[in-house]
Image (spheres, helix red, strand yellow):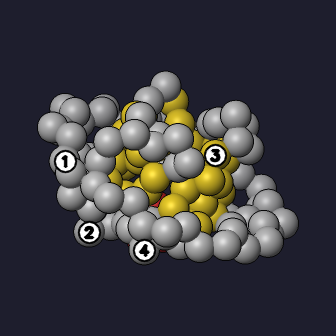
């Protein structure tokens, strides 16, 4: 399942070709999905993936995909850049305990962008 993820300005930030591993368009591995949970490769729980949205741990919308439903008004999508050569995925760290799922917000996360994956 191929997915492209756009931030609150409509800029393409990341993608997944297999529906599990998320890469930045530079080719850098950014995170991975385990069910509907988003983890950094360090093992940190950084968000949730539901209804085509990646939400931060506070329920704010960080990214939307083409299939996103609900949430805040989506901006016009920018043209996707050429994908960089994929870097080698790091070893996945021990997963942190998931935080309690926050109420879904209709607001954008302050972490909508590359910094989301470094939180």
Dot placed on the residue nearer the N-terminal end, 4 or 3: 3
Residue at 73% across / 65% down in the picture? 27
Residue 39, horizontal then vertical, whole percent: 46, 43
Q: Is residue 56 visible?
A: no
Sort mark 2 into few (<14), some (14-19) or many (20+) by Cα contacts within 10 Å.
Answer: few
Dot placed on the residue nearer the N-terminal end, 1 or 3: 3
Q: What is the distance, in whole Å, between disc 4 and disc 3 at their CAs?
A: 18 Å
Q: What is the distance, in whole Å, between disc 3 and disc 2 at their CAs?
A: 22 Å
For discs 3 and 2, the disc positioned in front in the rendered view: 3
Quarter of the rendering occupied by the C terminus: bottom left
Residue 2, horizontal then vertical, whole percent: 70, 42
Q: Are marks 1 and 2 in contact (CB under 8 Å)?
A: no
User: Can you tell which mark lies on residue 9?
Assistant: 4
- Give the residue number, with chain letter if any, for mark 2: 110
Dot placed on the residue nearer the N-terminal end, 2 or 4: 4
- Give the residue number, with chain letter if any, for mark 1: 105
Left or right: 60 in relation to 12: left
Q: What is the distance, in whole Å, between disc 1 and disc 2 at their CAs?
A: 12 Å
What is the tally of numbered marks visible in this picture? Answer: 4
Residue 20, horizontal then vertical, whole percent: 63, 36
Q: Is residue 93 above or below residue 116?
A: above
- Give the residue number, with chain letter if any, for mark 3: 3
Residue at 69% across / 69% down in the picture? 80
């Amino acid at each position: 399942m191929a997915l492209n993820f756009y931030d609150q300005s409509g800029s393409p930030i990341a993608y997944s070709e297999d529906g599990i591993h998320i890469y930045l368009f530079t080719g850098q591995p950014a995170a991975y999905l385990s069910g509907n949970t988003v983890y950094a490769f360090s093992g940190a729980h950084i968000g949730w993936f539901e209804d085509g949205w990646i939400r931060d741990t506070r329920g704010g919308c960080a990214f939307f995909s083409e299939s996103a439903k609900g949430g805040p008004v989506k901006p016009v999508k920018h043209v996707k850049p050429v994908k960089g050569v994929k870097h080698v995925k790091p070893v996945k760290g021990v997963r942190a305990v998931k935080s309690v799922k926050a109420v879904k917000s209709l607001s954008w996360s302050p972490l909508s962008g590359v910094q989301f994956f470094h939180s």
